[in-house]
Amino acid sequence: MKNATLILELGIIFCALFSIIYTFGVVWRVEKKLDLSYKLILGAIISFTLSEIASLVHLKNGEWLIFLVLILKAIFVLLFLFGVLEMRSLIRKLDGELENTGE
């Protein structure tokens, strides 16, 4: 069971790293509001990846490591939420639900 858990954790990290590469590609090609949304989502993915990598590290003093993982996951949730809210706002403006405010 320990090997299966390690394989799954490594698979998660690999997929997260892969998504970082693709999200960088999107951020590189888009502008303005869409760029901000994807930058926030990219930050979220990076934070998630770091939390997964940190959870694999087993050091003598594990308390600070557990705290670090929790902080990184909290950052992930916040950045992802703000990225989605920014994208929602952009889509609502494109659909005409919200008035364009200058940009």
Image (cartoon, grey):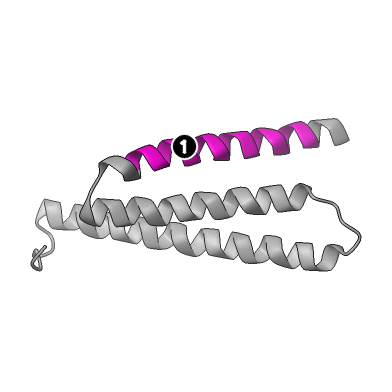
Residue 8 lies in magenta, yes or no?
yes
Q: Position of residue 87 (x, y in %)?
A: 29, 54
Q: What stretch is highlighted in magenta?
A: 6-26
Residue occupying the point 72% across, 53% down:
54
Q: Which residue was labeled with disc 1?
A: 21
- Amino acid identity at mark 1: Ile
- Using residue 40 as the reference point, say whether residue 10 is left or right of it: right
Q: Position of residue 12 (x, y in %)?
A: 64, 38
Residue 96 figure quarter: bottom left
Q: Residues within 10 Å of mark 1 (few under 14, many from 20)?
A: few
- Using residue 85 as the reference point, say whether residue 18 is left or right of it: right
Residue 21 lies in magenta, yes or no?
yes
Q: Is residue 29 visible?
A: yes
Residue occupying the point 63% across, 66% down:
71
Quarter of the image with the N terminus in it: top right
Residue 10 figure quarter: top right
Residue occupying the point 43% across, 60% down:
81
Residue at the extreme front: 28
Quarter of the image with the C terminus in it: bottom left
Report the predominant secondary structure element of the magenta stretch.
helix
Q: Identify the element where label 1 is drawn.
A: helix
Residue occupying the point 61% across, 61% down:
72
Q: Can residue 1 be seen in this view?
A: no
Q: Position of residue 94 (x, y in %)?
A: 13, 52
68, 87: nearer the viewer: 68
- Does 62 appear above or below 3? below
